Image (cartoon, coloured by chain):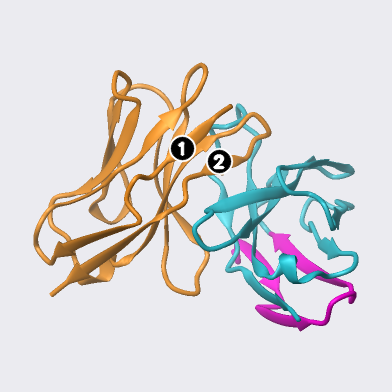
Chain colours: A orange, B cyan
Amino acid sequence: AQSVAQPEDQVNVAEGNPLTVKCTYSVSGNPYLFWYVQYPNRGLQFLLKYITGDNLVKGSYGFEAEFNKSQTSFHLKKPSALVSDSALYFCAVGGSQGNLIFGKGTKLSVKP
Amino acid sequence: NAGVTQTPKFQVLKTGQSMTLQCAQDMNHEYMSWYRQDPGMGLRLIHYSVGAGITDQGEVPNGYNVSRSTTEDFPLRLLSAAPSQTSVYFCASSSMGFRGTDTQYFGPGTRLTVL
């Protein structure tokens, strides 16, 4: 069965510092991986995805993610965090029903 | 281009009541789906549709019905509400490329409380 794990419930970062939100996956076959962000009382917004090709994927708002097949990871990164990046971040893998299979989410808190 | 819209934004029901959550998209997407979001559990798939007239069950379908009479609309019906259905419900849509690769676009959600 396909699954995604986000090992950290919360990540705390100071503004201006680099941030990493971790994600590992378990998939039989080729993984199709996504990151979404959810701001308070809002829907999910697409950040980026990996389907094939370059292992470093660039997305919206300065975020990027690195696909690592040997470590089965797809960590989300940003070189310099902003207070406005504070939100709930979800990693997901494409499912066989055309759906997304989500991790439990990681709350990112960026302090000034 | 409104994207994916959902109504209502908030709803309070009593146990046993029924209601319909509305979802519409204006992107001519063939694939539409419903998820529920519960604290610490991420989002879980309730039902999905690959086109008008075609629906199927997801991971947590019990207590919910769906229909897809048009490409644009995908309502979710709660037949007899239970407190366990207290959740935030999201509708999503995507075009039908190779399954599992399409970006899904989410509505703003409906926060449902069942007393």
Residue B95 against residue B19 in the figure, above or below? above
Segment colored magenta: B1-25
- Asked if residue B67 lies left or right of residue A4, the reply is right
The chain to which mark 2 is attached is A
- Asked if residue B98 lies left or right of residue A106, the reply is right
| Residue type, mark 2 in image | Ile
State if disc 1 and disc 2 touch (CB < 8 Å): yes
Give the residue at x 85% y 54%. B66
- Residue B74 position within the rendered picture, expressed as x and y whole percent measured from the top left: 79, 56
Give the residue at x 73% y 65%. B84
Give the farthest residue toward the left.
A16
| Numbered disc 2: secondary structure | strand
- Asked if residue B51 lies left or right of residue A103, the reply is right
Residue A101 against residue B38 in the figure, above or below? above
Q: Which residue is mark 2?
A: A101
Q: Nearer the viewer, residue B41 or B55?
A: B41
What is the distance, in whole Å, between disc 2 and disc 1 at their CAs? 7 Å
Q: Main secondary structure of the magenta part?
A: strand
